[in-house]
Image: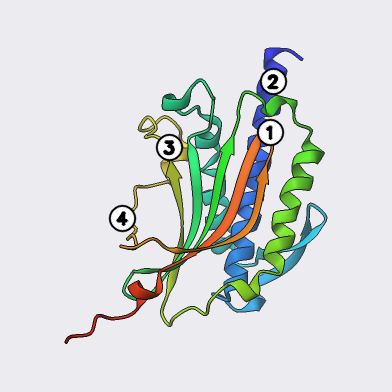
Amino acid sequence: MNMKDNDSQTGEVARTLVEFLEVAITMIVFLKGFYPSAAFERRRYMNVVVQRARHPELRDYMHSAASGLLPFIQKNDALNNVCKQGLVERVAVIFFSSDNVPVERFIFKLTINLSSAASVEENQLEFALRSFLVKLSVANPLVKPLPPNCRWEVTAYLRSLPDVGSSKEGELWIPTDTKQWMKPPVITPVKSLNSEPLCLQLYLEHPSLSETQPCQAL
C-alpha cells in the first residue's frame, strides 16, 4: 500500500468516526426526550436500529456539527506530532438548565492514531462502534429527567488550538463560553473501546450533589 492509499484509508476511518458521531448525537437527543418522539424516524445503521431527525434544520445542525469535526480529527496535534493524534480530544452533548448551567453531559473521549489508521479494516471499526450504538439504545436508566425550558448543544474540546481559518468546514465551529462545574462531576461509564487506531470512551457527567444543593445560612 503506497502513501496515497494510506492517506485514503486514514480518511475513511475519520469519516466513519464522524458519521458514527452524527448518529450517536441524534440518539442521545432522542434518548433525552428533548423533542417529541414523532420528530424522529427509525433507521438502520451498522445493522442497528437508530433514530434520524425528521426536521431538516435539526438534521442539518447535527450533520454540520459532526462533519465540521472531520478536519480537526484528521489534523495532527502539533504538541503530539510524534504520536500523530487528531486535534479532537472530546465531543460532548451538553444539556443546560434555563439559567444556562450544565445539568448533564454525554462525553465521547477519543484518541485516534492517524499513523496506524491505514491498517484497520472498515468492518472491524464498524463492529466496534456498533456496540456503542447498542449501549445507547438501552441507556435510558442512566439518564436524568431534564428541567423545564432547557437547551442543548454540541461542544468539541481540542488538544491544541488549530490555525484560524485553516478549514472551511472548521469555520462552522465557534469558541464557547460553556460554564464549568466548580467541583468534580459524578461520572457514569457507559462504554469504552481500547484498540488501534481508535480509543473511545463514552460516559455521563452530572454535577456533584453538593453543587446542586443551595447553600444554607447558619
Colour mapping: rainbow
Q: Rounded to the nearest whole Å, what is the CA distance between mark 3 and mark 2?
A: 24 Å
The label nearer to you, 4 versus 3, is 3
Q: Quadrant of the C terminus?
A: bottom left
Q: Earlier in the sequence, mark 4 or mark 3?
A: 3
- Which disc, if any, is residue 196? 1
| Mark 3–mark 2 CB contact (< 8 Å) | no
CB atoms at circles 1 and 3 under 8 Å apart?
A: no
Q: Earlier in the sequence, mark 2 or mark 1?
A: 2
Residue at the spot x=60%, y=79% of the render? 36
Q: Locate residue 82, reporting x and y percent.
A: 51, 20
What residue is pinned by disc 4? Answer: 177
Answer whether labels 2 and 4 touch (C-beta < 8 Å).
no
The local crowd at label 4, few if under 14, some if 14 to 19, many if 20 or more residues have their Cα within 10 Å, is: few
For the residues carrying marks 1 and 4, which lies nearer the camera in this image? 1
Tell me if 217 is positioned left or right of 163 in this view: left
Q: Nearer the viewer, mark 2 or mark 1?
A: 1
Rendered location of residue 139, percent (x, y)? 66, 69
Q: Quadrant of the N terminus?
A: top right
In this view, the residue in front, 66 or 155, is 155
Q: Which mark is residue 77?
A: none
| Placement of 109 over or under 179, stated as above or below | above
Three-letter amino acid code at disc 4? Asp
Residue type indicated by callout 2: Asn
Find disc 2 in the rendering and name its residue: 6
SS class, disc 3: loop
Residue at (45% x, 61% y) in the render:
153
Task: Kindly identify which residue carries mark 3.
Answer: 159
